[in-house]
Image (tube, helix red, strand yellow):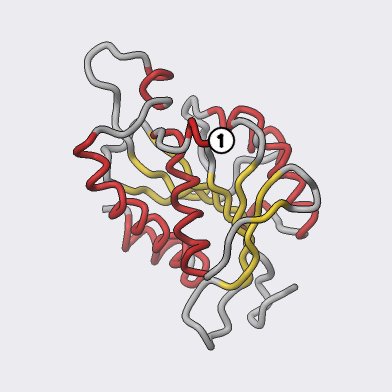
Amino acid sequence: MDDDNGSGVWLVVGLGNPGSSYSGHRHNVGHLVVDELARRMGSGFRAHKTGRADVVEGRLGAPGTTAPRVVLAKARSYMNDSGGAIKALATFYKVPAAQVIAIHDELDIDFGTLRIKLGGGDNGHNGLKSMRSSLGTGDFFRVRAGIGRPPGRQDVADFVLSNYSGVERKELPFQVDSAADAVESLVADGLEKTQQRYNS
């Protein structure tokens, strides 16, 4: 399953909670981004044989190029327990942590903004915490989609588990599109070039 440049398979994980009741929440922006990547690959998610995640397998990049092979994934478990499903996929596809990309919401970044990085802390994010625990390392890539801080005294948990505002919903497709572009850039061109392009 290796690609032509020898870099192997990439595992791209959209963090979020399963089920339609969560689909519009800020905490589920990772799901929106992998859905967009699946659309670009012309494929739909299907149950993986591990039974713990839904996946799309294919190549990301212009048709006819030797684009790397990618597995897009959404865990079937809740965000807080998603690490086990991700570890099972990484083991199945023989993907090292250095070729795992997690896409997630980030409170400390303004809405509409992206930050790309390798490694780092969890910053209170339970999905990242679960991934770190299961993979045994935090040294995976993160595409951090800014959602900003809650207004006033709203509880952080209530904020991330609530729908985007009307104004944000109009801007959201642009953020999702940019995050999907950033994933393609990471896989094709590496961290430094991707940070130059997207860490605005």
Q: Where is residue 130 in the image (x, y as percent from the top left)?
A: 64, 32
Q: Where is residue 182 in the image (x, y as percent from the top left)?
A: 41, 60
31 or 191, nearer to the observer:
31
Label 1 CA crowd tier, 10 Å (few <14, some 14–19, many 20+): few
Q: In which quarter of the image is the N terminus?
A: bottom right
Q: Residue at x 51, y 36 (%)?
A: 20
Q: Which residue is drawn at 31% across and 52% down?
A: 173
Q: Which residue is drawn at 53% across and 47% down?
A: 14
**Residue sticking out furthest to the left:** 167
148 or 161, nearer to the observer:
161
Q: Is residue 195 left or right of residue 55?
A: left
Q: Where is residue 26 in the image (x, y as percent from the top left)?
A: 39, 34
Q: Residue at x 27, y 39 (%)?
A: 111
Q: In this view, does 191 lie above or below 147?
A: below
Q: In this view, does 5 lie to the left or right of 169?
A: right
Circle 1 residue:
19
**Residue sticking out furthest to the bottom:** 64
User: In the figure, residue 110 lies in which quadrant?
Assistant: top left
Tell me the SS state at disc 1: loop
Residue type indicated by callout 1: Gly
**For the image shown, how many numbered marks are present on the structure?**
1
User: In the figure, residue 29 lies in which quadrant?
Assistant: top left
Q: In this view, does 165 lie above or below 4?
A: above
**Residue sticking out furthest to the front:** 20
